[in-house]
């Protein structure tokens, strides 16, 4: 599509949203059922496209991390949509009675979605489902880094939806910039903080409200009394799912000083349990492209040069380890997991979101030190705490701010349909899961219906003794 084509497509959706501002519940449900039918009938095709884009990414991984999540979201939304969409009656203050009032939940109009490459089906369709449920039209721009998946999404959406309901536009970063500049009624972007700033700036020209999910450095705090083996297994799963290319993946570990070696051994055992081998293992995803692999290698090379202990987890104990510049040289870019000890805070590995199977491990003397370290940086998208002491847990929750938290596990809060999911500060803003997502894509219109028996005229000018008596009565009620 040319820029003119994209703008024309947007105008089609915009006119449709203005001509049909009220979208009945039955129409919304039918659109959601079409999304479900699309996934049920073409899920294997989408999984194969994801596999082709990554080089190695098991269809089973796509099933659990993309398709299952979407099916659960659809089921939850369809079950609760009628309740979410109903007008909400509100209490009317005494001085306004006998008027009555409610909040009416209306579609915003046209919602733009700029989706990332790491979960190219889930993160494209999840915000679209919320927007459609709220009665909006949707324009989706999937990532150019997953061209097979993007092409399949474009083809399937065009089969199941008319262009004025839901459409997909494909293209490179220039097309994404064009989409971000359109005067949407709401814009959802998932990606890096750096690009998120550009998207927010482009949207601000039209005062377009945005939902930004931007990631960041999500910490794991291990308390002294935690089950180290259990924590290591859950951290390994959260870190290595999709080869670490997950916005809420554990980015680094904070644990009591002196337990680094014990955690390293437990982590090695956990990795061996999950992935007996790496290269050629369909369950262990590839790094998306050579550019991302080179970025991870550079990060590790810098850490090695500056004195960090970089440990590549070999699949067979005792096998020779490649230098940092040779990590992931297999044909499928399946980079083996890496632990980094003795990392300093000025290293790239501690400055940037890693987005790969690399895990720095830092020791702390006191819990206060761990909390201070987290609070000194940008607020993370996720935080993970492992331990048994509920008082310590609650102390950590009170003293840190993050988009979301999972206690004694990783990633799982994102799967809870009744929890809003989103970032805070540099990790983003807004949420689009469950009812919170539905409301994100609604305009909550205030409606007050005045009664014929209204006494409001008692407050009209000219002011005098009568006005003073009425105000005196009102002050007693407040």
Image: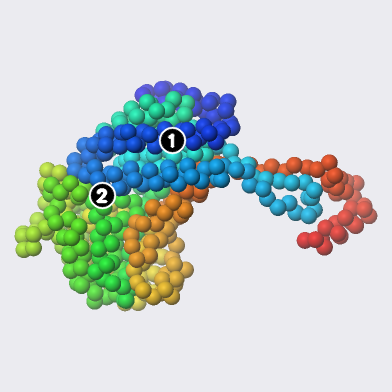
Q: Residue at x 54, y 29 (%)?
A: 17
Mark nearer the N terminus (2 vs 1): 1
Between 203 and 415, which is closer to the camera in this rendering?
415
Between 26 and 209, which is closer to the camera in this rendering?
26
Q: Nearer the viewer, mark 2 or mark 1?
A: 1
State the image coordinates of residue 314 (x, y, percent, origin top left): 11, 59
Left or right side of 191 for 438: right
Q: Quadrant of residue 290?
A: top left
| Quarter of the C terminus within the rendering | bottom right
Display colour scheme: rainbow
- Disc 2 from disc 1: Cα separation: 28 Å
Is disc 1 placed on a helix, strand or loop?
helix
Q: Which residue is mark 2?
A: 242
Q: Residue at x 39, y 52 (%)?
A: 415
Q: Residue at x 39, y 53 (%)?
A: 414
Q: Is residue 217 depicted above or below 108 in this figure?
A: below
Q: Quadrant of residue 166?
A: top left
Between 139 and 74, which is closer to the camera in this rendering?
74
């Amino acid at each position: 599509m040319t820029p003119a084509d994209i703008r024309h497509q947007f105008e089609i959706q915009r006119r449709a949203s203005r001509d049909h501002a009220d979208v009945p519940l039955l129409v919304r449900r039918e659109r959601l059922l079409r999304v479900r039918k699309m996934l049920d009938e073409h899920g294997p095709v989408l999984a194969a496209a994801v596999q082709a884009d990554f080089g190695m990414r098991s269809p089973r991984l796509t099933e659990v991390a993309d398709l299952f999540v979407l099916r659960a979201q659809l089921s939850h939304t369809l079950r609760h949509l009628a309740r979410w969409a109903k007008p909400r009656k509100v209490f009317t203050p005494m001085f306004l009675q006998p008027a009555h009032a409610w909040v009416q939940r209306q579609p915003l109009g046209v919602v733009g979605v700029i989706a990332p490459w790491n979960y190219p089906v889930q993160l494209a369709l999840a915000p679209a489902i919320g927007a459609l449920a709220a009665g909006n039209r949707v324009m989706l721009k999937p990532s150019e880094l997953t061209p097979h998946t993007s092409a399949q999404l474009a083809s399937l959406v065009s089969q199941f939806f008319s262009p004025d309901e839901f459409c997909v536009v494909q293209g490179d970063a220039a097309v994404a910039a064009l989409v971000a500049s359109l005067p949407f009624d709401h814009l959802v972007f998932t990606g890096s903080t750096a690009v998120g700033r550009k998207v927010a700036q482009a949207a601000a020209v039209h005062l377009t409200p945005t939902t930004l999910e931007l990631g960041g450095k999500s910490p794991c705090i291990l308390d002294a009394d935690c089950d180290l083996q259990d924590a290591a297994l859950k951290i390994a799963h959260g870190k290595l799912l999709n080869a670490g290319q997950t916005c809420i993946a554990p980015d680094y570990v904070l644990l009591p000083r002196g337990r680094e070696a014990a955690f390293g051994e437990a982590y090695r055992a956990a990795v061996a349990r999950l992935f007996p081998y790496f290269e050629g293992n369909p369950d262990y995803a590839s790094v998306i492209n050579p550019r991302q692999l080179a970025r991870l290698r550079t990060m590790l090379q810098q850490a090695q040069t500056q004195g960090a202990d970089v440990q590549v987890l070999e699949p067979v104990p005792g096998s020779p380890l490649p230098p940092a510049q040779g990590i992931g040289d297999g044909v499928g870019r399946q980079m083996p997991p890496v632990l980094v000890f003795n990392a300093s805070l000025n290293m790239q590995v501690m400055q940037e979101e890693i987005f790969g199977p690399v895990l720095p491990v830092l020791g702390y003397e006191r819990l206060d030190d761990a909390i201070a370290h987290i609070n000194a940086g940008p607020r993370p998208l996720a935080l993970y705490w492992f331990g048994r002491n509920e008082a310590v847990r609650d102390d950590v929750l009170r003293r840190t701010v993050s988009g979301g938290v999972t206690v004694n596990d990783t990633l799982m809060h994102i799967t809870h349909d009744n929890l809003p999911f989103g970032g805070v500060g540099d990790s983003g803003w807004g949420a689009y899961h469950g009812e919170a997502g539905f409301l994100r894509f609604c305009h909550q219109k205030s409606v007050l219906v005045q009664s014929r028996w209204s006494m409001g005229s008692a407050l009209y000018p000219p002011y005098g003794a009568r006005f003073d008596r009425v105000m005196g009565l009102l002050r007693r009620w407040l």
